[in-house]
Structures are given as C-alpha cells and as structure tokens.
Amino acid sequence: MSQAEEVKTLIAQLERFTNSPPQDIDNSTRIKLREASKNLSIAVELQSDTLFRIGFSTMQLYMARVGNDAKIWTVLAESDGPLSLAQIAEKTKVDPILLKRVLRYYASLRMLDQPGEDAYAANNVTRTLAGPGDIAVEYFATLMQKPFEAIPRYLKKHDYKNPAHPTDSPWQEGYETELHPFVWLQNNPGRFGLFMQWVHLSRAGLPLWFDVFPFDQVVGHGSDKNIILFVDIGSALGHQSIALRQRFPDLPGRVIIQDTPQVISAVQPSHDIEPQVYDFFTPQPVKGARAYYLRNIIHDWPDEQAVAILKNQISAMSEDSVVLIDDMVLPEKGSPWRATQLDMAMMATLAAWERSETQWYALLEKAGLEIVKIWKYTEECDDCIIVAKPKKAV
Ligand SMILES: C[S@@+](CC[C@H](N)C(=O)[O-])C[C@H]1O[C@@H](n2cnc3c(N)ncnc32)[C@H](O)[C@@H]1O
C-alpha cells in the first residue's frame, strides 16, 4: 500500500471513530487514542494552522462563556433531538443573525454537532459545558484571567527567575495586590467558592487515591474506635475524608479535617468527621494519628514553606504514623498536559510548583522525612500518594 493509500484508510478509520466513538475500550487505551490523534493533528499542521490554533486559543474560552451566559449549552443539552436556529433563538433570546454565526463557530470547533443545514445538536463537549463545565469556564475566564495574562510581563520583569516567594508571582502583578491568593480569596467569598468548586471539579471522574493505595491495610490495620485514623490537613470542606468514610464504612477510628477558620465554619458535619481549625504553619496539635494526609497542599507552596508545613507534622507523629502526600509526581520526560498546565497555573498564582520525583526526594529529605513508597493513581495527572516517615523511624 502506498503512503497516500495508507493515509486514506486512516482518515476513513478516524472519521468512523469520530462519528461513533469506541465504547468498548479501557481508559488507558482511550487516553492513548486521544493523544495519538491529537499528536497527529499537530504533526500535520501547516504554519498558518499553528498560528490560528495558538493565536485564537483564548477565543474558545470566551466563546464558551457566551454559551453559558446565553444558555446555549443548556438549551441544546436538555433537548431530546436537534434544534433549528429559530428554536434556539426563541429559547435563548439571542439575535438570530448573531446566533447563526456563533453556532457556526461552535460547530467548526466540535463544541456542538450540526447534523443538517438548520439542525444543531448537543455532543459530548456541549454536555460538559452545560453541566460542570460552566464552573470551569467561569473560573478561567474570570479569576484566572489576570494572573495568566500577567505571566509574560511578570517573568520579563523578574529576569525569568523561577518565582519562589508566595506573595511575588504573576497573581500579584495581575491583580495589583500584595496579598497571597488564599488571603485575597478570603476577602472575596464569591470567588473563593468558585475556586473550591474548580478544585473539586478538576479531578472529577478520575480514580480516587484509595482505588490504588490500600489504605485499610497500610494505615487502617488493627484500628479501633479510639485511635485517630486520619487527619486531613488543609481539607477544604472534607471531600476526601467523606469519600474515605464511604469507601471504608466499617473501618473504626477518628477522622479529623483541618483548615482555616473561614473554611471550617462552612463545613456541614457529616460521616462522623470532626472539623478543626488549624494553621499548618504551626505545630500539629493532633498527636499520634495513623495518617497525616495532605492533598494538593504541598504543591501550593515553594520549598521553604513546604518544608515548614511538613516539619510541623513530624513533631506530632508516633511510631505508627505516616505522612501521606497526595500530589503529582512528574516524570523527567513526557509529563501529561493536564499536569504541566496545572504546574504553570501554580507558578502564576502561588509561586508554587508540581514536583518531579527527584524534587520530591530532595524536598522530603530537607524536611526530615524519608519516602517509603510512591503509589501512582492517575494517568491523566500522574497523581500519586507519597508515603513518608520521619527519617529516624524508617
Ligand atoms: C488547593 S486547596 C486543597 C484542598 C483539599 N486538600 C483538596 O485536595 O481538595 C488548599 C487548601 O489549603 C487551605 N489552607 C491554606 N492556608 C492554610 C493554612 N495556613 N492552614 C490550613 N489550611 C490552609 C485552603 O483553605 C484550602 O482549603
């Protein structure tokens, strides 16, 4: 077969799968298929394709927001079948002349399907944007817009040094503030709520850490109702602790969630979980717990603060205690794009970072901890549970 014939066959196969996406494949194969087709698409780009793809990348976000604001996504997603332009205009009150242009844009970027000249239907992207996607669009188009836009300005001004001070990053440049984002967010409760929703949503649908890490065996073995089983530090509203209780309903032991006064005051007590105000820059007050769990906490901070947080836990640990760090552990090559984008967001907002395995070993060494084992539980972000113990106790 000539290369031209080979390509023709591949195009036919890709079109077939695009029209009817394969259902009977495991998640790992689905990711490989997604990446292979995306990589191929970029590999065959002309110069002008690249310029349009990158140059217009923010347009898609703002046009997605138009779809939220004008309820185009929900109108389509709630319909049992395709709708005409007139029907969508009637329900959304968007000028039909404008609407036709907007729908044409969405169809060209597969944000909806257009099965006929005057027929528009929801696809997988539309349904995401109508559902939880509206939160993500709102988050990136509002809260993240200023720090992201400030990245080049900030880096140039700072001679391209890696941001390493928590209150000196593109966030402060973009918002013209001296406040750390967590303090800024506390002063802006509406924005804080949006941030928390995004934190939750950003991992929706991915495996949970105890799908891979055998918590009941490694941490919960021989537990009883009097032991402190799990301390969830910087827990937010405690989603992970609730999920843990739901997964191991018969595992006895106390579960404590800790966060700032503002967050803890918003917690609705449930699942026998004890909320507690705690500042992780002070020594841990809960002594001798089986597990001190930090999910997406250490990645929020540069090394100096990360070490301080970890040292504050060591002073409370007993022989049986472990630290469980739930964060990304990036490989030296081939990090997933979700992870690298989150890493740039950490740089832009918190002067913080997602760390590679080498960097985790170095950081924990500085904090006086030794890594016992790293359990990877997502392919999308290389999320891992790092099990660590104080150096002397290993
Ligand atoms: C990125 S969120 C992670 C939340 C949660 N662990 C999760 O993975 O969903 C960081 C959390 O750290 C909390 N936090 C920030 N500074 C803190 C401090 N000094 N002491 C305790 N919690 C703090 C924030 O309120 C927020 O809930």
Image (cartoon, rainbow, N blue to C red):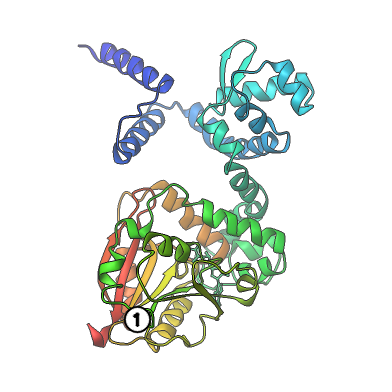
**Where the C terminus falls, by quadrant?**
bottom left
Q: Nearer the viewer, residue 235 or 254?
A: 254
The location of residue 77, given as percent across then percent down, is 60, 29
Q: Quadrant of residue 246?
A: bottom left
Establish if 222 lies above or below 374. Answer: below
Residue 387's spot in the image, x, y percent?
Answer: 30, 71
Kind of residue at disc 1? Lys
Point 35% across, 54% down: residue: 382
**Ligand 1 placement by image quarter:** bottom right
For label 1, the residue is 366
Disc 1 secondary structure class: helix
Residue at 59% x, 70% y: name it: 168
Q: Kindly tell me whether residue 174 is visible in this rendering.
A: no
Q: Residues within 10 Å of mark 1 (few under 14, many from 20)?
A: some
Q: Position of residue 225 (x, y in %)?
A: 38, 79
Quarter of the image where the N terminus is located: top left
Query: Residue 114 appears at what percent x and percent y?
Result: 57, 17
Q: Is residue 377 left or right of residue 269?
A: left
